[in-house]
Every structure is written in structure tokens, then in C-alpha cells.
Image (tube, rainbow, N blue to C red):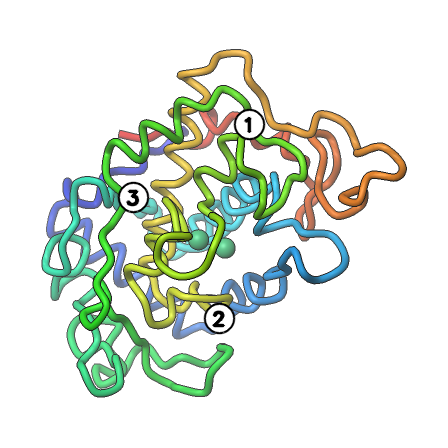
Amino acid sequence: MVYTRKDVSTLTRSERRRFVNALLELKRRGEYDEFVRTHIEYYTSDGETGLRAAHMTPSFLPWHRMLLLDLERALRRVDESVTVPYWDWTRNRTPTALPWTEDLLGGTGRRSDRQVMSGPFAYRNGKWTIKVGVTDTDYLTRDLGRARDPITLPRPDDVEAVLDDPVYDKAPWNSTSTKGFRNKLEGWGSGQGPTSWHTHNRVHRWVGGHMVGGASVNDPVFWMHHAFIDLLWTRWQRRHPGAHYLPAKPLARGDAQRGRVVARHEKMPPWDVTPNEVEDHSRIYRYA
Ligand code: CU1
Ligand code: CU1
């Protein structure tokens, strides 16, 4: 059965509760922290050697699609009514809007140490201790909107400009690609600081705290953010029929990126699937 992923602002109270409870149950069983571990393990950047499967790379989109599917399957083993909602940050744009409510993700962190104090994922409520991270805090942190150095979320116009690019990705297939849908969506820009953070990356920065860096999966908003990114990939496909994942073939000998990116029909670790095989999700889930 094809199931539906909904806009988080349309969830009923009972749907919110079931989603939260399924996450807490995965956390209690230790399954959730495996997702954090996988994401940290694959957090390879341009400056390192070896294959980049997850970030700064064409397979950014299919890789996160697979991670979301695995999480969603785990949630649905706990409660088969649950799907991952998406957070449309072009519409829900403030630190008090959804999904930052008491009954869903809770709010921003307190001023002194960024510790999240409200909602089901606040450390003090006893069910969400950070166990796998790149720092040693055991509480979830956020700094919604970056109170002391504010940035804004991407706007509808920014998303339109990203969706307008008809080419999936371009050489050099990394964080310096200035053309191509993938990096416009992933959001690596030139320079340093806030002006260099676009679209997907900018949202991670806007949330702040754990959402910045490899341990971002510790904040459950990660899934809602990436569900929206995944939806934008689907919208891009509809806007550009016939456009596909690139590179179509493994890069030529002598290309500096050869062996560092996943081509359309190559396996994408840690899964036994190719980007081509996950390009169409319509038989698994759809977006409302
Ligand atoms: Cu990621
Ligand atoms: Cu991300």
C-alpha cells in the first residue's frame, strides 16, 4: 500500500502524538541512535579522500531518501499508522510556528547553553538523552533563528530559483558546483558565514545546536526537514520531465572526482541500491 507523507501543519493531535511516541520508542530500544551513527559515519566532505555518498555529492538526494525510508520503516514497525511529516519552512517560518510546539518537537534552547527545555525531546523530560554525538553534551540543543546573530529561512522565491535549474548536477560534482539543481538545493555557496549558506544548509543553520554538523540526526526535525527536501526533488522531477540523476556514467579516468561520487547505476553505500532505483518513490509513498 502506498502511504502518504503529510505537511506537519495538517497533522491531527493524535497523529502528532503517534509520531512522537514512535520516535521515543525507537530511541528507547536503541534503534534511533543507529541512524545517528550512520549519518556521522557517512559525513565525508570534499576535503577528505574516498567516496562521498551522502553530502557534497550528487547522491545527496537519493542517500537521504534511503535514510528516511529506513527510519520510516522502523517507525511503522512500532506504529503502522505513522509516516514522516514534512516541514515546509517557506511557510512555517518562526520559532513559535509548527513544528516547534510543546506536543511535537518542543521549542528553542535556553540562552545559557542552548538546551531544549520544552516538549518530548527535552533532556529533562527523561526520554531523549543524546548518546551518539560529536560533542559530549547529553541534552539536545537548538538556537532557532540564531537569536544573537539572526538569519532567515529560505523564501519561496529561493526555492523557485532552485527548482528552475533543468540539470540535476554538474561537474565538479561537489560543494563547489555552481550550476545544477542538487547543489542549489543542498546549498553550499562561496565565501564564509551566513551568506554562503543556502536552502537545505541554511535550514540546518537556522535551527542551530545539534542540527549543525554530522550529529544532526539527534534532532528529530532532521527527518521533517529532509522529507521536505525529498519532496522538492519530486517537484523538480515533475517540472523537468525526462531529466534524470547525473552523472549517468562513472566518471572518466583522469577525472579528479572519479571514484568519489556515485553514478546513476552504481551502488550507493551502505545500501544495495543505485540512485536510478530510488528515483521514483510513487509505489512506496506519496506527498500530500
Ligand atoms: Cu545529511
Ligand atoms: Cu540535511
Q: Position of residue 32 (x, y in %)?
A: 45, 66
For label 3, the crowd category at 10 Å Cα-Cα, with few meaning under 14, some 14 to 19 and many 20 or more, is: many
Q: Is residue 32 above or below residue 282?
A: below
- Between circles 3 and 1, the one closer to the viewer is 1
Q: Residues within 10 Å of mark 1 (few under 14, many from 20)?
A: many
Alpha-carbon neighbours of circle 2 within 10 Å: few (<14), some, or many (≥20)?
A: some
Q: Give the alpha-carbon distance from disc 1 to disc 2, as whole Å.
A: 32 Å
Three-letter amino acid code at disc 1? Answer: Tyr
Residue 129 in the image: x percent, y percent?
36, 81
State the mark number for residue 33.
Answer: 2
Quarter of the N terminus within the rendering: top left
Q: Furthest residue to the top?
A: 242
* Secondary structure state at the residue bearing disc 3: loop
Query: In the structure shown, which secondary structural element does the residue marked by tag 2 occupy?
Result: helix
Residue type, mark 3 in image: Tyr
Q: Which mark is residue 168?
A: 1
Q: For the residues carrying marks 1 and 2, which lies nearer the camera in this image?
A: 1
| Label 2, ligand 1: CB separation under 8 Å | no
